[in-house]
Amino acid sequence: MDHSRVPVLEALEEFRRRGDIAYGPPGHKQGRGTDPRVAEVLGIDVFRSDVLSLNGLDDRRQSQGVLAQAQELMADAVGADQAFFSTCGSSLSVKTAMLSVAGPGEKLLLSRNAHKAVIAAVIINGVEPVWVHPKFDGERHVAHPPEPDDVRRRLREHPDAKGMLLITPTDWGTCADVAGVAEACHAFDVPLIVDEAWGAHLPFHPDLPPWGMYAGADLVVTSVHKMGGAVEQSSVFHLQYDRVAPEVLKQREDLLGTTSASSLVYASLDGWRRQMVEQGHDLLDGAIVRVKRVRELADGLPGLRVMGQEIVDEGLAASFDPLKIVIDVRELGVSGMQAAEWLRANCHIDVGGSDTCRISASITYADDDITEKRLTDALRTLTEHADEMEKLPEVRLPQPGVLELEQAMRPRDAFFATVEHVSAEQAVGRIAAETISPYPPGVPVVAPGEVITAEVVDYLRSGVDHGFLISDAADPTVKTLRVVARD
């Protein structure tokens, strides 16, 4: 295919050339009504490019082929049979993918280290989750993806399961054996969905972890805004084989997605695909060389431990994304959250993620000598001033296995059940009716339907005292919890 073509961008360029005036949304009329004070910050071209697809550029129902062509080019670029753009972020795309495989009351295997968006999908879709617990790394206090044998065992225990959702790479860049998990799923003739939100760049360089489509996954969801070059909320479904019907995926996406898709998202996805096909290997080559320098420097600084090949050598993960720099800061006597806040306040560096133990920074093809030096200088400064930080209450980290809670009710049933609010102490032994996801990193410690334990309450309460943000809990202080009412 001709990857020099960018159908959405070309249609937008033609729309501008014609000088069309739209008498429908958006109401700002391609920037004519935009407050100059807003345009000064955002730029007037953002509004000039904000064009309604219907009666403007294109959409799936009154198509001139613009979006369809762009999606065909994306599929060809990454080795998929079909690709579908989504403008609602992968949080919604994952919900759509899950609903395309399992419906209300049906079973679906899920990695328990999933983001809260997956738990939300379980509640909305009404599926019965069959949790596949990750491999917990007690030394680093981090969850790595489950292994193929874990998936095989759960499929044997639940032969009526409709498929599997696997999260890889994780927020911390560790990767699953996608090919092995796909083989396990296909032996039971069920599809493998891969939430590869952090992996949009993987198809474009052989020195990166295996790309889900190449490894045999049936349906892969990516967030191109995370490690790629599209704007926020840019997501793509990639589909192959015949275990998930494309018309089913389209219908489920229409069920959940917006009818006011953003031309800005479509255009940036289209342009990024062209850039990656034409220049991606060389651009990622540069990023890989750059990140190697950053890793070596960070690993040589006192008090910092950079996670890398050792997790593969120890059998904890199949591979890891080298562009995700994960740094354990505990030897500095601070938490990752403290380090992240200090770096932002004192060095104007915003790291990609943090938790009680570590911080992470993503290096992409967009980094240059300036951003490399800013990061390495900031890490060096952090090590020099860590002992000046306030000593906060210690987070009482749970032991491996403590977070594997008993699932006593289906999450949807628990979430919509009659509930009561009780003290944290009284909640022990009760069934949760809410999702409790400490930020960072946003992976639920408690999901609706799970039985709350004393160890989990202790972990959450100590985390709040240290600085956890728990925005999805009814009581963010976790002094009280929302539980299923007793008969």
Image (cartoon, rainbow, N blue to C red):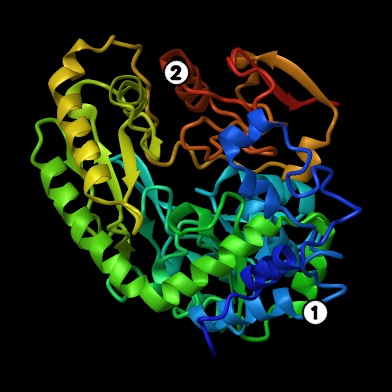
- Residue 374 image offset from top left, x and y in percent: 23, 37
Along the line of sight, the residue nearer the viewer: 107 or 474: 474
Q: Nearer the viewer, mark 1 or mark 2?
A: 1
Q: Are marks 1 and 2 in contact (CB under 8 Å)?
A: no
Q: Amino acid at mark 2?
A: Gly
Left or right of residue 376, residue 24 in this image = right
Dot placed on the residue nearer the N-terminal end, 1 or 2: 1
Residue at figure coordinates x 59%, y 33% from the top left: 40
Q: Which residue is mark 1?
A: 64
- Residue 160 image offset from top left, x and y in percent: 70, 70
- Residue 175 image offset from top left, x and y in percent: 38, 61
Q: Which residue is mark 2?
A: 467
Left or right of residue 29, residue 334 in this image = left
Along the line of sight, the residue nearer the viewer: 3 or 432: 3
Residue at figure coordinates x 43%, y 69% from the top left: 149
Q: Residues within 10 Å of mark 2 (few under 14, many from 20)?
A: many
Q: Judge whether residue 310 can be spotted in this image.
A: no
| SS at mark 1 in the image | loop
The image quadrant where one finds the C terminus is: top right
The image quadrant where one finds the N terminus is: bottom right
Q: Judge whether residue 379 can be spotted in this image.
A: yes
